[in-house]
Image: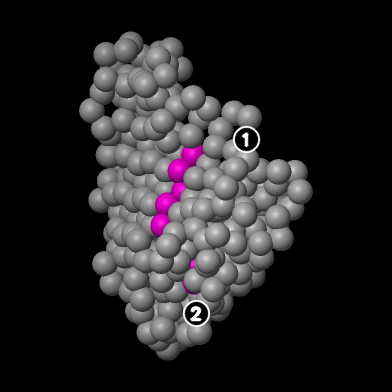
């Protein structure tokens, strides 16, 4: 892959007027050119990452003030990817759902966190629609089905992924979450070059500032994005990215995000900390993938599993489909055939 020459852009240091002083309302052409090159490098690397097969872990924890951390999510993940299509399998070792007390239970009786009814989940995005299959845990109090599913339009992708505990629209392009260069307010941004290439950026607003670090190992090596409230020295949102290379493409091998509701060093109350980490232990880029991997037939779905097709409205609710040897069929049609009508 051809690396974009950031060192040529960012040197000599004396030439870079944008690196010093307070941001001006005038658009610095060198700053704009550097951001433009950063976007080009990002897109060039993304285009090199055509397919991937990966396995790893996703974890999410919550620590309230003066309390021990609660492990909300701990899941093994397996990903098949052929941009923009993907299939992700999550096997939940731990997945807790927050409960609300309706007043019928005392503080002693009430349990804020209870295990999810879902033990495993597969999410398939075929480029047009998104399909989910969930394996349910047996219940001692009610007769749950073994599994359930849904079919939705692609615009539901973010909501479905977030609802599964994976808060990204795409399981591979993790770098898109911390920093959107297209939306960067360049009028209030300054860039300071590193001697060996790359730069640090500082966006200053009235109530916060955001600092980001862009190295130049391969033209777009975003390492960290930290946001600070005005007057605070500890970030209230902090992203860390670790990159690796596979078959000519760079990918985020480990992604960490920590969010704090407040910081103690400003005299405010103790912060609540939310920690998310995604780490790939195995990652193979640009390997052949069977197109069938992005179909429901590639998943082991028990016959009789009911799917809610949220693309269609029947009687004020989603259309019900059932999985059979012939694939997904209308539940009404299956009932009619079974009754000999």
- In the displayed structure, 155 sits above or below 247; it is above
Q: Position of residue 203 (x, y in %)?
A: 58, 43
Residue named by callout 2: 3
Q: Is residue 333 magenta?
A: no
Upstream in sequence: badge 1 or badge 2: 2
Q: Which residues are magenta?
A: 219-227
Q: Would you call the spot at circle 2 few (<14 residues within 10 Å), some (14-19), or many (20 or more)?
A: few
Q: Is residue 155 visible?
A: no
Q: Quadrant of the C terminus?
A: bottom right
Disc 2, SS: loop
- In the displayed structure, 140 sits above or below 109; it is below
**x 38%, y 36%: residue:** 274
**x 57%, y 69%: residue:** 9
**x 34%, y 71%: residue:** 244
Residue named by callout 1: 205
Q: Would you call the spot at circle 1 few (<14 residues within 10 Å), some (14-19), or many (20 or more)?
A: few
Q: Is residue 241 visible?
A: yes
- In the displayed structure, 167 sits above or below 70; it is below
Distance Cα–Cα, label 1 vs label 2: 33 Å
Disc 1, SS: loop
Q: Position of residue 101 (x, y in %)?
A: 42, 19
Q: Main secondary structure of the magenta part?
A: strand
**x 27%, y 13%: residue:** 108
């Amino acid at each position: 892959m051809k690396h974009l020459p950031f060192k040529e852009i960012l040197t000599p240091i004396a030439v870079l007027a944008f690196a010093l002083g307070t941001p001006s309302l005038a658009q610095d052409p060198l700053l704009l050119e550097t951001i433009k090159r950063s976007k080009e490098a990002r897109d060039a690397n993304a285009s090199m990452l055509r397919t991937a097969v990966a396995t790893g872990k996703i974890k999410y924890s919550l620590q309230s003030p003066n309390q021990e951390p609660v492990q909300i999510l701990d899941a093994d993940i397996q990903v098949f990817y052929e941009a923009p299509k993907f299939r992700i399998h999550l096997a939940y070792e731990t997945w807790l759902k927050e409960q609300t007390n309706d007043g019928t239970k005392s503080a002693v009786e009430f349990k804020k966190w209870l295990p999810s009814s879902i033990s495993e989940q597969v999410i398939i995005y075929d480029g047009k629609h998104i399909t989910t299959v969930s394996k349910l845990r047996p219940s001692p109090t009610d007769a749950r089905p073994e599994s359930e599913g849904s079919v939705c339009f692609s615009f539901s992708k973010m909501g479905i992924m977030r609802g599964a505990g994976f808060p990204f629209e795409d399981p591979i392009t993790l770098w898109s979450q911390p920093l959107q260069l297209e939306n960067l307010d360049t009028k209030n941004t300054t860039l300071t070059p590193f001697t060996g290439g790359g730069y640090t950026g500082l966006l200053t607003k009235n109530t916060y500032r955001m600092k980001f670090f862009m190295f130049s190992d391969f033209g777009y090596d975003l390492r960290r994005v930290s946001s600070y409230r005005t007057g605070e020295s500890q970030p209230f949102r902090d992203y860390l990215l670790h990159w690796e290379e596979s078959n000519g493409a760079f990918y985020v091998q480990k992604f960490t995000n920590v969010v704090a509701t407040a910081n103690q060093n400003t005299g405010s109350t103790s912060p609540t900390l939310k920690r998310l980490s995604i780490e790939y232990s195995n990652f193979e880029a640009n390997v052949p993938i069977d197109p069938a991997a992005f179909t429901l037939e590639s998943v082991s779905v028990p016959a009789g599993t009911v799917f809610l097709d949220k693309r269609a409205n029947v009687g004020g609710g989603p259309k019900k489909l059932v999985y059979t040897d012939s694939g997904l069929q209308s539940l009404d049609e299956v009932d009619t055939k079974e009754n000999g009508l």
